[in-house]
Amino acid sequence: MSEPRWLNEREARVWRSYVGLKLHLEAELERRLVRDGGLSSAEFTLLVPLSESPGGLLRARDLGRMVGWERSRISHQVARMEKRGLVVREECPEDARGSMVRLTEAGREAIVAAAPSHVEAVRSLFFDAIADDELDVMAGAFERVLDRLPCDVG
């Protein structure tokens, strides 16, 4: 077995900063979504692609792929959102085994109400801390890391 390629001090600092950023940013964005928009981050995550799709309708399988979730997670979250009246499930016309998820009017109202404060939180917590000339560098770095990861999330 080969010797691990341990992180040097600089790399460890970057990694710890990333892990802390991910943890605290996600928690604060979730807190603000609930407080300001009455939605969980899971609900918001599904409402965004539904609100952007034609007719607010997506096949459940495709919605899962879009957000990187497994079928069971999509199924459970959609069931919770159905109870809140944010979405409805419909039969898939092409495949009796598949199901469609449709955004309801209440779901559309919820995402329209939550989106402005959410984007302001993203801007104030993340982008306002980054200099304009750093954005392209960060995007390039993030994209290179993403390219190394398996694309079959969820």
Image: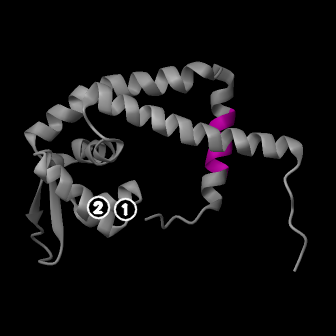
- Label 2 is placed on what type of residue? Ile
* Residue at which label 2 appears: 74
Q: Is residue 57 visible?
A: no
Q: Main secondary structure of the magenta part?
A: helix
SS type, badge 1: helix
Quadrant holding the C terminus = bottom left
Where is residue 121, by image quadrant? top left
Q: Is residue 144 left or right of residue 39?
A: right
* Whether residue 127 is situated above or below residue 148 in the rendered picture: above
* Residue at which label 1 appears: 65
The percent position of residue 54, horizontal first and vertical second, equals 18, 47
The percent position of residue 42, horizontal first and vertical second, equals 33, 47
Q: Is residue 98 visible?
A: yes
SS type, badge 2: helix
Q: Residue at x 37, y 56 (%)?
A: 66
Q: Which residues fall within the magenta stretch?
A: 137-144
